[in-house]
Image: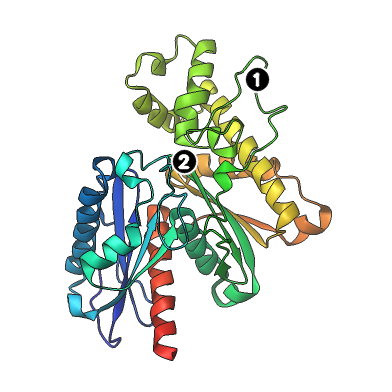
Amino acid sequence: MSRTLSSCSWVAVGLDNGGTSNNATVIDAGGTFLVDRLLETPSRVREGPDVAIDALVRAFELALEATGIDRSDVRAVGLDTPGPASADGVISSVGSTNFSHPGWGGFDVREALETALDVPVTYNNDGNAAALYAHTAHFSDDVEDRSSISAIVGTGLGGGVIESGRIVRGAAGMAGELGHVHIPLHGLLDAGQPLPVCNCGFVGDAESVASLAGIERNLLPYWLSHFPDHALAGVKPPHKAAQMVRSFGERGDPMALKIFEQQAMALGRLFTIAANYSDPHAYFLGGGVVEATPEFRAWFLGRVRGHTLLREEQSRVAEFALVPDLDMAGARGSALAALAAARLGETR
């Protein structure tokens, strides 16, 4: 269901660019979302920047078609992509987990989309966008008086740090890259289990364990060697097998639960590090686990909480919660960022 523009004179569009899909939403000037469902289109990022920008333009057009909004009513666009990237939307010179095409290295995705749409574009990485939405939705009227840390488990491991209601971006725009924080591995790995290697080249960072890429590259091959008769042993390609692990976990499969226990421990250790440098009011968990059955996601969040070591004073005030609204969080966070930028422009 969608709602059309009524009393508010303009809107902002949020675009969430992922490794396989783009998600889009629309928010009016009063802060009301006009789309309450996923609007997905193929992202085509593996085909390079030119094709991917065209795909983002199509996602933008789909959002307007779904809401009946005229293009002239769009005052701002929010875009998020996987990181690492600068605060201005320039993809890292070495690319990223999702942007493996050589054309992405050093590509200014924000400027390219702004040129294609002829509308101001505000950029965030995907973890920051989802973190902003989680923080805003959870704290409502207390947004500016609270802080939070979000870990978004997807193909990679995104993250976001919110302080006093604002995204912490850092000097180069790469703050909140929680996936590439190194975590202690003692007691996390099974005896004889190889050190996990991240697609970025790091050994033993959080993403090397707590991500779909981590399952495919590190966890599933190891655990299949201990469960050689498992149904996933014959599934090809490996990426497909990794995607299927969650469905086995939801059914209580012993091998899948060992994988997710390691992921929960990795995330708990990551949050423990965050507790000592940021001491946030809330820890949010998002990504594919949010799409799981209620029983499984409650179990997983509980395991993450159990592996997060907080001081007594922190335990009394800290909250643990799932990022709301499934895969709409990134697009909604991008829309909120664009809305804030457009409002700021009105006050200048």
Q: Quadrant of the N terminus?
A: bottom left
Q: Position of residue 219 (x, y in %)?
A: 52, 24
Q: What element carries label 2?
A: loop
Q: Is mark 1 on a helix, strand or loop?
A: loop
Q: Quadrant of residue 3?
A: bottom left
Q: Which label belongs to residue 190?
A: 1
Tell me the mark number nearer the camera, choosing from 1 and 2.
Answer: 2
Residue lying furthest right: 312
- For residue 172, side relative to residue 101 (left or right): right
Q: Position of residue 168 (x, y in %)?
A: 58, 63
Q: In which quarter of the image is residue 334?
A: bottom left
Distance from disc 1 to disc 2, alpha carbons, whole Å, reads 22 Å
Q: Which of the colour schemes (rainbow, by chain, secondary structure, one colour) is used?
A: rainbow
- For residue 195, side relative to residue 25 (left or right): right
Q: Where is residue 298 in the image (x, y as percent from the top left)?
A: 56, 45
State the residue at coordinates (77%, 50%): 310
Task: Give yes or no for contact between labels 1 and 2 (Cβ–Cβ under 8 Å).
Answer: no
- For residue 17, side relative to residue 131 (left or right): left
Which three-letter amino acid code belongs to the residue tagged 1? Asp
Q: Is residue 54 shown above or below 335?
A: above
Residue located beneath label 2 in the image: 156
Residue lying furthest top: 229
Neighbour class for label 2 at 10 Å: few (<14), some, many (≥20)?
A: many
One can see residue 253 in this view: no
Which three-letter amino acid code belongs to the residue tagged 2? Gly
Neighbour class for label 1 at 10 Å: few (<14), some, many (≥20)?
A: few
One can see residue 149 in this view: yes
Q: Is residue 196 shown above or below 145?
A: above
In the image shown, does 318 or 190 lie closer to the viewer? 190
In the image shown, does 216 or 121 lie closer to the viewer? 121
First along the sequence among labels 1 and 2: 2
State the residue at coordinates (23%, 41%): 47
